[in-house]
Image (cartoon, grey):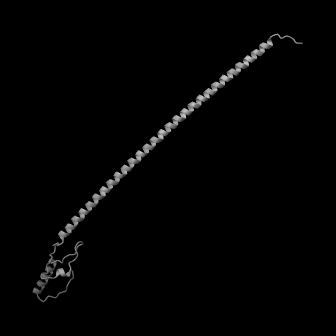
Amino acid sequence: MPYYLIIYSSISDELEFFFFIQLKLIMKRTKETIFRQHPEWQQRQGISGLKEFDGEDLQYDARNKYNKEQQKQWIQEQIQEKKRKQEQEKAEEMAYAQQTLEINRFRGMLQDNFAARKTDIGVAAKQTNLQFAKEKKDKEERDKQEKLQYEKNERDLLLERGRKQPYNG
């Protein structure tokens, strides 16, 4: 507030100035706020200079309506966002379930394939072992027959040598 250097000619002038200062402190100028600009000069002029009183908010209803609409819009956006998030989570769960199902199915196929191969290998090993056993048995039988034949031939030779033979001299 500016300070004035005033020379008073009388006490009545002094009182008059004092009341002027007091009146100026009581009368405030309309303030500018964030949501409301300072009124234009056309709004400040007229028959009465008091188109708007200090503390009076002429745009309260419109601003309140705008705020409610904005809140309603934000709530709708949040609802939509929540729905999208739930749909995305559901889609991810379905994809995970499908992937798990495919993995389990593939694992089952691999286990069946492994079991079939293991059975085939077991059957082949059994047949091979039976073949080897048969070959071994046949070889042993052949060896036995050959040995018996050799022994029979030896016996016959010894018997023939052990007899007296006429001298053809």
Vertical comparison of 139 with 11: above or below:
above
Q: Quadrant of residue 124?
A: top right
Vertical comparison of 97 with 1: above or below:
above
Vertical comparison of 124 with 165: above or below:
below
Q: How many marks?
A: 0
Residue 134: percent from the left, percent from the top? 61, 26
Q: Residue furthest right?
A: 169
Viewport quadrant of the C terminus: top right
Task: Kindly identify the residue that appears in the image at 45 percent across and 41 percent down.
Answer: 108
Residue in front for this viewpoint, 148 or 71: 148
Task: Kindly identify the residue that appears in the image at 39 percent across and 47 percent down.
Answer: 98
Seen in the image, is 137 located left or right of residue 64? right
Vertical comparison of 169 with 94: above or below:
above
Task: Kindly identify the residue that appears in the image at 52 percent across and 37 percent down.
Answer: 117
Residue 86: percent from the left, percent from the top? 32, 53
Residue in front for this viewpoint, 58 or 53: 58
Seen in the image, is 78 located left or right of residue 121? left
Q: Residue furthest front?
A: 168
Residue 67: percent from the left, percent from the top? 22, 66
Q: Quadrant of residue 25?
A: bottom left
Viewport quadrant of the N terminus: bottom left
Q: Quadrant of residue 133?
A: top right
Residue 105: percent from the left, percent from the top? 43, 43
